[in-house]
Image (cartoon, helix red, strand yellow):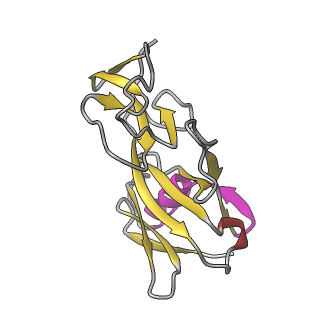
Amino acid sequence: MACAIRSVSRGIRGWNKWEGSYGFISRQAVNLENPRGDSKMVYPIVEYGQMDPLLQSQSAVTMGVVYRRKEIPQLSNLLIFGDNPSGEVFYVSADKLPNGGQDAIRRILFNDKGQTKTLLQLVQEKNVAQGKPASTRADLRFGEGPNGELFVMTKRDGVIRQIVK
């Protein structure tokens, strides 16, 4: 089965000959034969398929930050990144990179007054509070404050959220 892949890379980009570890055919398909077949390419440290049930059909990685502070120990030394438009937030180790393979992607959920929620759920709740229809997208971006604070911005509700312990 052909599917599109979204990836987090640590080197030279191969677009539009490669989509992640697979040969690029089109925006709808990749070649599943001979993955990682070009020795001159630097392949992603993580990648995921658009067919993942957590995601929407049109997804794209939005790069985040490497969190080096200690205020949120659960996130220390992790690369935090997200998926557009689903608003899913993920992490991988920033320091213990796999040697020639891929690392596992782990999901981050948010604690909102004791309830676990996705970023998209937070956006939708804010939309309703704003008197707007609940968005089907988050359109997130990450940022760091002057003291290394971690922020996530969402275009669909216009909110900048600080991630705290």
- The residue nearer to you, when weighing 93 against 121, is 93
The residue at the far front in this view is: 39
The residue at the far right in this view is: 114
Range of magenta residues: 113-129
Quarter in which the C terminus is drawn = bottom right
**Residue depicted at x 71% and y 66%:** 74
Vertical placement of residue 85 versus 152, above or below: above
Give the image quarter of residue 132: bottom left
**Residue depicted at x 41% and y 56%:** 63
- The residue nearer to you, when weighing 157 against 28, is 28
Residue 156 point in image, percent of width and height:
37, 59
Query: Is residue 73 one of those drawn in magenta?
Result: no
Q: Taking 126 as reference, is 13 left or right?
A: left
- The residue nearer to you, when weighing 71 against 155, is 71
Give the image quarter of residue 4: top left
Q: Across the whole image, how many numbered discs are drawn on residues?
A: 0
Residue 90 point in image, percent of width and height:
57, 52
Residue 102 point in image, percent of width and height:
57, 38
Residue 28 point in image, percent of width and height:
32, 22
**Magenta stretch: helix, strand or loop mostly:** helix
- The residue nearer to you, when weighing 127 against 49, is 49
**Residue depicted at x 43% and y 50%:** 10
